[in-house]
Image (cartoon, helix red, strand yellow):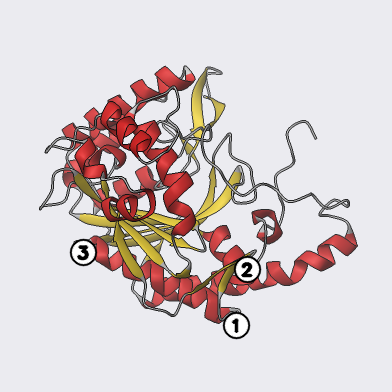
Amino acid sequence: MKSRPTASPAHERPLPLPNAPVSPWWTPHRHADRRPALLARGRIEKAVRGYFAGHDFLMVDPPGLQRSPGNETHLHAFATTMIGNDGVGGMMYLHTSPEFSMKKLLAAGEERIASLGHVWRNRERSALHHPEFTMLEWYRARQSYDAVIDDCVALLRLAATTVGAGQLRIRDRTCDPQAEPERLSVFEAFSRFAGIELGATMDADGVPDGEKLAAAMLAVGLAVPEDRTWSYLFSRVLVEKVEPQLGLGRITVLDRYPAAEAALARRTADDRRVAERFEVYACGVELANGFGELTDPDEQRRRFVTEMAEKQRIYGEQYPIDEDLLAALPLMPETSGVALGFDRMVMLALGAPRIEDVIWVPVAESGA
């Protein structure tokens, strides 16, 4: 994506996988059970493509194979070797998002582009996660990020309407997509749902202090783990206290993320502590992650280097920085962009309990 830099699988609490069906997905009776949802998926895809055509977007098709799969700490890529005509191999990756390719297209002169295609993320499998999934990503040059927020809401409403769903649903959680969305800053959400004044845990320039956040957590009775980095603690509170309360009854737009948690977004004009990053939630499920895009190559390099240093510290590995992207950023106009998990949107529109229920061919389990 447009990924969530802080959502480390080490402390995420995704919905667990329900008991797997006894029969494989490819047995005729299982396929017959799954087929109505898959056909509904096709209708939603057709409607989504129609939406973008109707709003003068070009649908583009970025390649999955990249030198850099993304430079965010908790994203894990699938690696492979590309062998040249000389027989010499070099490391390549399957992309975790088409973002870098699409930003180069914006630098080249495209203004309004969208992509609907497969992306790959390692270490991710649950009721809401799949190692290969479909991402809907789009960009609007010379428009504010409010425009892509409006797109997200319109698409969730369109998905529900296309399949005749009055509510988005997952298990016992529901959301009326036609209701007026709630827009909530991250600072407001932490205060309301966790009793923590997040802004007080960073300085005026947005530099965070892990010990201050740890103290704030202890003051409201939250356990503090051994890892007291601010980013880790932020994610713990977000996942455990905030996210389950979002998108219940109506869509929630969680807006104005701390700048420290927005590696690809520009800072807001009125408060350097926060950035133009948002996420869209329905039924407590994160569906989309978007930004007012950062176009300063020097600042972007600094953020990538910081992210990769943290990845090395936690996981003992890091990915190359895409130098072509950094070279292209000065040519890119002010732009807003967002990535939406297409499979998750289909899940909620159909009330499916697990992501594999709406994927035509699930990836085989490792070793299967």
The span from disc 3 to disc 1 (Cα, nearest Å) is: 32 Å
Q: Secondary structure at mark 3?
A: loop
Identity of the amino acid at label 2? Arg
Q: Position of residue 93 (x, y in %)?
A: 50, 32
Q: Is residue 159 visible?
A: yes
Report the disc number at residue 11: none
Comes first in the chain, label 1 or label 2:
2
The span from disc 3 to disc 2 (Cα, nearest Å) is: 30 Å
The residue beneath circle 2 is 41
Q: Position of residue 122 (x, y in %)?
A: 57, 35
Q: In the picture shown, does residue 262 fall above or below 349? A: above
Q: Is residue 321 visible?
A: no
Q: Is 284 left or right of 188, judged from the image as shown?
A: right
Residue mark closest to the camera, 1 vs 2: 1
Q: Secondary structure at mark 1?
A: loop
Q: Secondary structure at mark 2?
A: helix
Q: In the picture shown, does residue 313 fall above or below 220? A: above
Comes first in the chain, label 3 or label 2:
2
For image coordinates 76% across by 68% down, the residue present is 35
> Between 331 and 293, which is closer to the camera in this rendering?
293
The residue beneath circle 1 is 164
**Which quarter of the figure is the C terminus placed in?**
top right
| Dots 1, 2 in contact, CB < 8 A | no
Identity of the amino acid at label 1? Gly
Q: Position of residue 306 (x, y in %)?
A: 29, 26
Q: Is 117 left or right of 229, judged from the image as shown?
A: right
For image coordinates 59% across by 47% down, the residue present is 129
For image coordinates 33% across by 37% down, the residue present is 219
Comes first in the chain, label 3 or label 1:
3
The residue beneath circle 3 is 143
